[in-house]
């Protein structure tokens, strides 16, 4: 029996997943967490050696748990946290900690650069070329910061020894024994350096951020042979790496959303909605992003995206910083201790730990909890956390409905947080839609495996529809609809008063 190995390198850990290469059934997965580094308020970093070791450990444990012989792995798919920026040498050695997508250190730089563009009459220059706003979320300002603030990076740049990349590029470079230095458009489209129409690096954008094209990987199709494993102590040489997608695009692919109109929301560290718009790069009028879903045989498929930076991370904050719970799943029974919704009437949690993404794009926004009284307790804060996640994601639905003109009354969901039944019920009620949860909720890893299968000519796009299966549905709770309609209005009013 042969298998596809999917490597899902996420914000808090790395998942290695095993998929049957014939039936494409999800077999098993192993996750290894790694430390989050917070050097200063608003700064978020990852140690690249920690990331690499989490990949190594997850793959080794997965193979051992399933008694696999190394020759049974026929191809590898990679998916990754997207905008997180790596700087490493041509020998594959990290030159600095990775700057994570949540990091806000370049807020002032972005503000000044946007002002410069505005003064030159080019205020919409970036959005027209890249589909993205000028925000520290994306990779280019992080690269510029490293060049100007890290001595190792600056020195290696002078010696023409500096390589930049998103996590996919770093992993590919390491897996291939420093032979393959590539990326693909779903990741490259998140850098502010790629022209959305040509799906190539753009010289004008490179000059804006003072980055050389020689410091960037080659952009190739999302499916195909990226390279072969080489010189590893946990995998044999010669396994082809045949599919790479950014994590949200991979989840869309794993949800069978490869055709126009496909839509999904992933609940991970953050929450992200993607709507497949096919060959047309739709421009948003409501704060959404225009991005690449994938590129196949030179043809690009685009998507509209709504980005909420904090979802599961809010629950992690309750666990790690407030010590209110010992594990993330404990938030659901704790929130259910609130028996009367009237107790939550004035309590609102704005989970803006990393600023606000879609639709408002406020990089300096901070999280807050309002409406607490002397009788407020752990259960109220837990329930407010779930409400806050659902309400912030509802802002994305509102923008998506307005931009697309679609009613959007059903939604496929995935990611670890969708196992929280209460959160799914709240989301269905807040957003007035039916939520559909698939049998395989780890669709990010699953999408990477399907991408690898497409890239190795082991399956066709049409087969993906046959593989996707529904597990359960969540409908709006009619008894709570009026409460959440009022809560949504209160949410909107407070955002306008306190944040906008």
Image: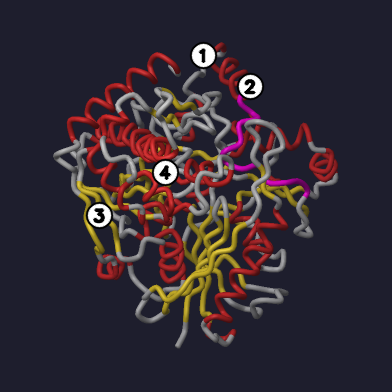
Element carrying mark 4: strand
Which residue is disc 3 drawn over? 436
Q: Earlier in the sequence, mark 1 or mark 2?
A: 2
Query: Is residue 189 at least partly visible in the picture?
Result: no
> Sequence-wise, which precedes: disc 4 or disc 3?
4
Lower position in the chain sequence, tag 1 or tag 3:
1
Mark in front: 3 vs 2: 3
Q: CA distance from mark 1 to mark 4?
A: 34 Å
According to the image, label 1 marks what residue? Answer: 121
Q: Quadrant of the C terminus?
A: top left
> Crowdedness of circle 4 by 10 Å Cα count: few (<14), some, many (20+)?
many
Residue located 40% across and 50% down the image: 293
Q: Name the side, left or right, on which 446 lies relative to 285.
A: right
Residue 39 visible in the current orientation: yes
Q: In the rendered image, which residue does mark 4 sit on?
A: 271
Between marks 1 and 3 in the image, the one whose residue lies nearer the viewer:
3
Label 1 residue SS: loop
Discs 2, 4 touching: Cβ within 8 Å = no
**Relative depth, front residue between 120 and 132:** 132
Q: Which element type, helix, strand or loop, lies under badge 3?
A: strand
| Spatial separation of the CA atoms under disc 4 and disc 3 | 16 Å
Residue 384 location in percent, x, y? 38, 35
């Amino acid at each position: 029996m042969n298998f596809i190995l999917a490597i899902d390198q996420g914000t808090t850990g790395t998942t290695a997943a095993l998929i049957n290469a014939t039936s494409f059934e999800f077999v098993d997965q192993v996750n290894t967490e790694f430390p989050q580094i917070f050097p200063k308020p608003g700064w978020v970093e990852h140690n690249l050696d920690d990331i690499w070791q989490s990949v190594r450990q997850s793959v080794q444990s997965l193979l051992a748990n399933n008694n696999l012989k190394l020759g049974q792995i026929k191809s590898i798919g990679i998916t990754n946290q997207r905008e997180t920026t790596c700087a490493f040498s041509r020998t594959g050695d990290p030159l600095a900690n990775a700057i994570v997508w949540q990091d806000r250190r370049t807020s002032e730089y972005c503000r000044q650069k946007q002002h410069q563009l505005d003064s030159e009459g080019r205020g919409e220059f970036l959005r027209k070329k890249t589909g993205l706003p000028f925000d520290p979320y994306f990779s280019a300002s992080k690269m510029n910061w490293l060049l100007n603030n890290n001595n190792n990076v600056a020195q290696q740049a002078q010696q023409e020894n500096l390589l930049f990349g998103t996590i996919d590029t770093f992993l590919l470079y390491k897996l291939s024994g420093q032979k393959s230095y590539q990326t693909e458009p779903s990741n490259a489209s998140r850098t502010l350096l790629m022209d959305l129409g040509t799906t190539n690096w753009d010289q004008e954008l490179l000059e804006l951020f003072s980055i050389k094209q020689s410091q960037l990987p080659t952009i190739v199709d999302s499916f195909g042979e990226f390279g072969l494993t080489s010189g590893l102590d946990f995998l044999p040489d010669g396994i082809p790496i045949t599919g790479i997608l950014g994590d949200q695009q991979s989840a869309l692919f794993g949800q069978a959303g490869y055709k126009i109109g496909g839509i999904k929301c992933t609940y991970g560290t953050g929450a992200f909605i993607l709507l497949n718009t096919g060959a047309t790069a739709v421009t948003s009028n409501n704060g959404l992003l225009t991005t690449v879903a994938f590129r196949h045989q030179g043809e690009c498929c685009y998507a509209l995206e709504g980005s909420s930076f904090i979802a599961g991370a809010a629950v992690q904050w309750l666990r790690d910083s407030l010590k209110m719970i010992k594990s993330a799943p404990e938030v659901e029974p704790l929130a259910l201790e609130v028996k009367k919704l009237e107790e939550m009437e004035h309590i609102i949690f704005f989970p803006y730990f990393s600023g606000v993404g879609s639709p408002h794009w406020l990089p300096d926004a901070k999280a807050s909890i309002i409406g607490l009284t002397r009788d407020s307790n752990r259960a109220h804060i837990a329930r407010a956390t779930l409400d806050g996640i659902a309400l912030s994601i509802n802002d994305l639905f509102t923008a998506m409905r307005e931009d697309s003109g679609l009613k959007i009354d059903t939604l496929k969901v995935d990611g670890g947080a969708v196992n929280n039944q209460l959160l799914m019920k709240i989301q269905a009620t807040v957003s007035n839609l039916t939520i559909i949860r698939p049998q395989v909720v780890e669709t990010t890893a699953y999408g990477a495996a399907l991408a690898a299968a497409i890239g190795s000519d082991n399956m066709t796009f049409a087969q993906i529809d046959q593989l996707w299966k529904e597990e359960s549905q969540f409908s709006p709770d009619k008894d709570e609809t009026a409460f959440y309609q009022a809560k949504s209005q209160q949410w909107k009013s407070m955002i306008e008063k306190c944040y906008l």
